[in-house]
Amino acid sequence: MTDTDLRIDSTARVLALRVQEISQREERNWRIGDPWPLQVRWRAASDDVVDHRENIRASAADSADSADSADGPSPLAGNLPSIHSVYQSVPTGRLVIMGRAGAGKTVLAHRLILECFNHPGDLLRVPVLFSLGGWDPSRTGLHDWLADRLIGDYAFLESVDATGTALARVLLGAGRILPVLDGFDEIQRHHRGAAISELSRFDGPLILTTRPDEYAATVSATRALSRAAAIELEDLSLDEAQRYLRSVSSKTRTAQWESVFSHLRTRPDDVTSRNLAAALSTPLLVMLTRTIYNDTPHHDPAHLLDGGRFPTQNALEEHLFSAYLTALYDPRRTVPSGSGKTTWTDHQARRWLGHLADHLARLNTQDLTWWRLDVTLHRRTRVLVTGLAAALVGGIVGVLGYFIADHLFWTVADGLRFRQELLGSQFRQGLLETVTGLVAGLAAGLVNETRTRRRGTGRNPERLRLRPFRQPVPAPSRASRDIGAELVIGLTAGLVFSLASWFAYGFAYEFSHHSAEVFVQAFAPFPVTWLPPTGALTYVAAGLILGLLVGISYAFVNAVVYMFSGPNDGNSAVNTWDLLSTDRGVTLFRVGLVGLTVFLVNFILVGGQYGGQYGNWESFLRQGFLYGFLYGSFAALTRLFLSAWGGWLLFARLWLPLTGRLPWRPKLFLDDAHDRGVLRQSGAVYQFRHVRLRDHLAYQHRARLGIPEEPPASRAEGDHAADRQAPKHV
């Protein structure tokens, strides 16, 4: 084997371990095998949704029929050879798994992934789960989207080979990835035809999960997924639901369930019986029912037959989702991992989870990422909050800078009267920097909004670790592109706040002070005789010079970051907070180095200019420190607000908790929600356990805000969040 082949194999093995960890952890968190899994059956899908140009359906159908004819239904975990054998029987390795909402498609996908790991011969391709909700096939091809998601979820795949190609793309190109694509129905309706075309062009095995109605509608309008077999999950029977609920019940609760199921069998035509039987036909709602009525002893399952409270199936299902959250946040409930050191009340959890669910529904995605929590706010709010925070910091920096400069570096100035003539009071001078801070924050906010509008993603976290010369840096083309982008961003933000700073100072002194002239002369390699000593033009020149310095500093620091960092390795577990930690480290390095660079340049050049003009060290030290401290601080502050971690600090840790939309400790809250089973992990992001749970919380949230909307359970099966127009921000 060549060195390239060896590296591909080692990378694939590391990726397999990370994927296996996630699937095993999610199965444990969902309590799939406690005490034994719900039994799921499937049948071959109808001819209408199968590609008839390939002779693949017969083998898949035969395998499915043989699974159905076995002694009893096959369990969903542990000894489930049928799902793996069905997949292996498809010659092309392309399988569509259909099932209605809550039928267990995602759980079955995780089980199939784990079954592949139990068969070493299958590991030529590593099965990786991808959530399709955020894919726009009109903008990004499937291959590029898969590569981006692999790098996003498994940062070590951003490392490059000898040709400068990211390992994620190398694995895809070598056919070492088996894409398990979850949630075709979550793609926006008008993009599904293009998605089918992209999936059909993908030359390799894949697994696709979808709701049947959405897939059938797309197939009828375009075509079926080429060379793919299809199976459809069947509903649970009453016997299966009863057997499962009885197995996890106490003696008292078992008797209560016997009474409930006796009513369902003896009076099947009652409205209440039909509603409850329909609800208990899906694994998702059976699991919710178990949590509500078996894990919390003060609930009686006989209430489910109350036709007055639950006149429709929709009302009953909404009750189950609501009661499920109440049960999860019951103060008597023990969190499995014990991570929740703070007790969240049911009311608090609903308010905060509702805000997050509404946020995801607006974005038409399932992925909950810490670096996009600010998108829950209106654009104007984000820009104004950034500006106000920077204005506050600017005022503090200004007053502190003048105070330190006056008291540490001004000792011999009796004859010059420089302090009184040039500066006035420290407080008044310092408050002028509030304007600089405000404009710096507004500039950073506008740059962020421009990036969000152009790329649709806004601030993304850093994925490089500070690791000097130990790992290969990213491809030179990408490094050059990123350095150029930093230069443009730095110039844009730097010019705006630099001009604002000098104009604020100029207006305060009617553009009559010589400080701008001194600043320009400090950076000019030759005397600037054509520039007037005072006036607005001189202040504009000073602002342009400072803005250029900030832009160059941004680009310089970006180059240094690439020199002193490398991609992640595969030894750490995949976790969304790993990205936060990495981004925090790189951001602090960037911010500190930008501030230090601008400080040193101003300290040396501006301080030297003042020292030469007034002929003493005190002027050099004082003015050099003052200019360096002020402008270095504002350059660093702007860089902080342009980063993903800066947005997390400003919005997720300050503004959203201050306005009651999130708790003061959001990381702990989200981890606790995952431990309780409200959230699940998909790669490096969190998702709600099911899209119906997300929609339920979003509906409740909008109802609290007074936004009229139809309850999610009463919508048509195919008319869910991916196809609806989200209400406007409030």
Image (cartoon, helix red, strand yellow):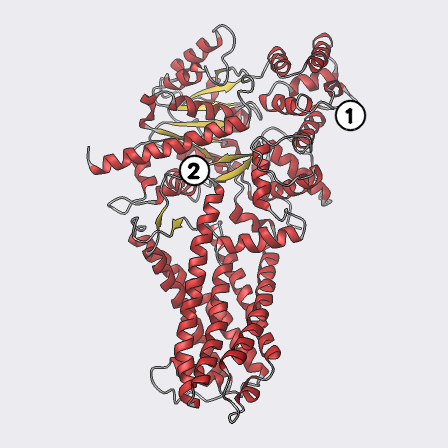
- Residue type pointed to by label 2: Ala
Q: Quadrant of the N terminus?
A: top left
Pick whichever, 511 or 230, lies toward us. 511
Q: Earlier in the sequence, mark 1 or mark 2?
A: 1
Residue 366 lies, in percent from the top left, at 54, 38
Pick whichever, 618 or 431, lies toward us. 618
Q: Is residue 574 left or right of residue 239?
A: left
* Residue at mark 2: 573
Pick whichever, 129 or 362, lies toward us. 129
Residue 399 lies, in percent from the top left, at 58, 74
Where residue 425 sits, quadrant-wise, is bottom right
Where residue 60 sits, quadrant-wise, is top left
How far is mark 1 from mark 2, CA to CA? 46 Å
Q: Is residue 13 left or right of residue 102?
A: left
Q: Is residue 485 above or below residue 247?
A: below
Pick whichever, 56 or 22, lies toward us. 22
- Residue type pointed to by label 1: Arg
* Residue at mark 1: 309
Q: Is residue 438 above or below residue 274?
A: below
Q: Is residue 548 visible?
A: no
> What is the total number of numbered labels drawn onto the structure image?
2
Between tags 1 and 2, which lies in front? 2
Other residues around mark 2 within 10 Å, as few (<14) / some (14–19) / many (≥20): some
